[in-house]
Image (cartoon, coloured by chain):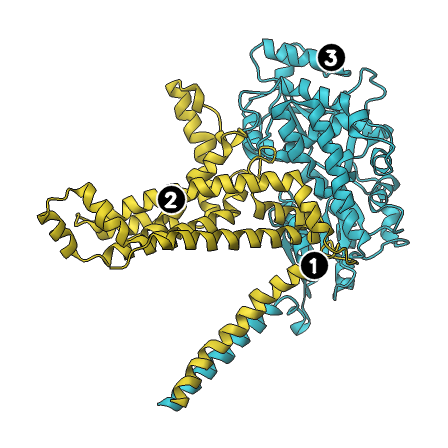
Chain colours: A cyan, B yellow
Amino acid sequence: MKKNTKKILTGAFSLAVGATLLTGCGGDAGNEGGNVTLELFSNKSENMETYEGLIAEFEEQNPTIDIELNAPPEAETVLKTRLTKGDMPDLVAIGGNATYGELARAGVFEDFSGSEFLEHIQPAYIEMINQLVGEAKEGTYGVPYASNANTVIYNKDKLEDLGLEVPRTWDEFVNALETAESAGEVPIQFTLKDAWTGMIPWNSVAANIQPENFAAKKSAGEASFQEDYSEVAEKMLTLIKYGHDDNFGVGYGDGNTAFGKGEGVFYFQGNWAIPEIKKANPDINLGVFAMPVTNNPEANKLVSGVDVLLAVNAEADNKEEATKFIAFLLEQENAKQYIDEQAAFSAIHGVLQEDPVMEGIKQNFEEGTITSFPDHYYPAGMQAANLIQAFLIEKNKDEFLTTLDKEWEKVENR
Amino acid sequence: MQKKQNTYILMTIPALALFFIFHTYPVLQGIFYSFTDWKGYGEWNFVGLKNYFNVFQDRRALSAYGFTFQFAIVSTILVNIFSLLIAMGLNAKIKFHKTLRAVYFMPNVLGILIVGYIFNFIFAHFIPDIAQSLGINALSKNILGDPDLAWIGIVIMAVWQAVAFNTILYLAGLVTISDDLYEAASIDGAGPWKKFWAITFPLIAPFFTINMVLAMKNFLMVFDHIIALTGGGPGQSTESISLLIYRGGFEGGEFAYQSANAVIYFIVIVIISVVQIRVLQKREVEL
């Protein structure tokens, strides 16, 4: 009897240890039977269906490679958490943002410098992502794939009913908002329950007003929010006046639905929101334009950035397969399929967005009146989005600009 | 005798090993990193106590502490009032009391993120829609979008969810009180109110202590409720300490700095729990 107890206990113990060991190293069990499993980690939830379609096609052409798509919520945080654990995915599709810069500087990604992939990419975008990494570490650690536009989306029918034209200067824009309000419309559909949505107008306004290379100057102590962002903050306060009753109670998802159903004349969102709005109302007549931030139409630029760049984990076991998948995505027809389904713009030469909705910003891409997202150069630990959300509620400009300066310095000093 | 002891050791050693690997070791690691400037990846150096000094000067960390304490105290009190009331009701000889127990336990079974999704809908659509049709202006907006009111929304959901578990503990306590006492009190002419203060409450004091300490500790570590409802906003008005540590540590690349914050936070929770137990145990009575 006693012997039995001992046996059972040892058995249970070895089982428990075995189980922990198994869960501990479940990640790399993909190489059996000649089949390779690649993980594609994406920070976007909007384009999952598109990826899945492309992956199915790729897997058909390459039966030995399985691609698992993983696009969790709060993806960048998840990515960094996994990095801390030493469990990086093989293939990463993220935006050209501060996170990319940080990870590339830390040497997480494979360097693509000199790769033939980059020959197909528009140089402006390569330069944009190189700038994010900074001068301290030379190289191109990802392949820009799709780019986005930080726009004002508008309801064409409503604008026509109000007898308005697409505004080309700040004054015309404010005028349009005024007209919409007096006609009893909601001029702007804000979705500020999600703090990040406040960054859309902020980036448009700041990009056109802030001095060149603000971030570098700020870090060197040659610029500050208090000196250079006063007008930005004021213009934000002007815009918030034209919202609806519950600017801070409506989230991104609800806002897309509301705008689709005809609530609001203008909506500050990137091109990525267009498919979402059309889900709520497929017949809506939408247009986009770059926010006219100054009164000089020639000087107003469209904020555009790399929405998706493809990077390979420098320590991945299956680099060859990962590169193969990138080559597949870069093929003209696949890149075209991606931008058509996502209402995005391609970073690849000769792949053009022809959607009539995009008519209003086509010119910006053709003429190159494009500038990058200011907040991609802010230190991530600052969490500017929440600070801006708080500012739009409290409307205390001086205190807000001081806080921005302090937070920036605080994060850099850590 | 020797054999028997071996059996018990065999039971506890694996647990001890697992506990050390998955609990103690990471804590020690965290303490170690709090003295460095590690970002979670890449190279690092020792920086001594710099991170600790920075936490005390960080206005954002202080306001997170403020919010967390406000939230934890209010929620702990409310949870204990409601769960004691419900437990007493369920302990009485009423009809369907078994079914009712199951119903009241339901919230504890649901995941907080799911509950959060439901409450988000209630706050964003359900309440404002009803309030608008009734013409009540005060409630016609989403309270989660108001920096002064958002914390109330979180308290409502947290209390709703936590009452179930504490009710079970109180029920366990109420069962230990013998009916004889109440009968004797009735003979002496005590009313229900008197019975509660003179018999029930003193006798479930150990359970009261446990419930207060557990609830307080759980609410001080509030995290998923906030992720589900407000994500720390509007502004930073509902940013709890655990959320700040997670966000700053992983998103903001301040792993080492937030490790220091976590160590301080750990010490604070231990101190509060110990003080609570000391104070509350003094007023417990033995029968």
Question: In the displayed structure, does residue B214 sit left or right of residue B227?
Answer: left
Residue at 44% x, 26% y: name it: B128
User: Which chain does the numbered disc 1 sit on?
Assistant: B
Q: Which percent across, then down, holds residue A297? A: 82, 17
Q: Quadrant of the N terminus of chain A?
A: bottom left
Compare residues A325 and A154 and report the one nearer the observer: A154
Q: Residue at x 78, y 29 (%)?
A: A225
Mark carried by residue B79: 2
- Is circle 1 on the same chain as circle 3? no
Residue A373 percent coordinates (x, y):
77, 35
Q: Amino acid at mark 3?
A: Glu
Camera sees residue B156: yes
**Image spot of residue A394 (x, y percent):** 62, 24
Residue identified by numbered label 1: B33
Nearest the viewer among A361 and A10 is: A10
Residue on which disc 3 sits: A172
Q: Amino acid at mark 1?
A: Tyr
Mark 2 is surrounded, within 10 Å at the Cα level, by few (under 14), some (14 to 19) or many (20 or more) other residues, namely: many
Q: Label 2's element?
A: helix
Q: Which percent across, then down, holds residue A56?
A: 65, 54
Q: Is residue B89 visible in the rendered structure shown here?
A: no
**Mark 1 touches mark 2? (CB < 8 Å):** no
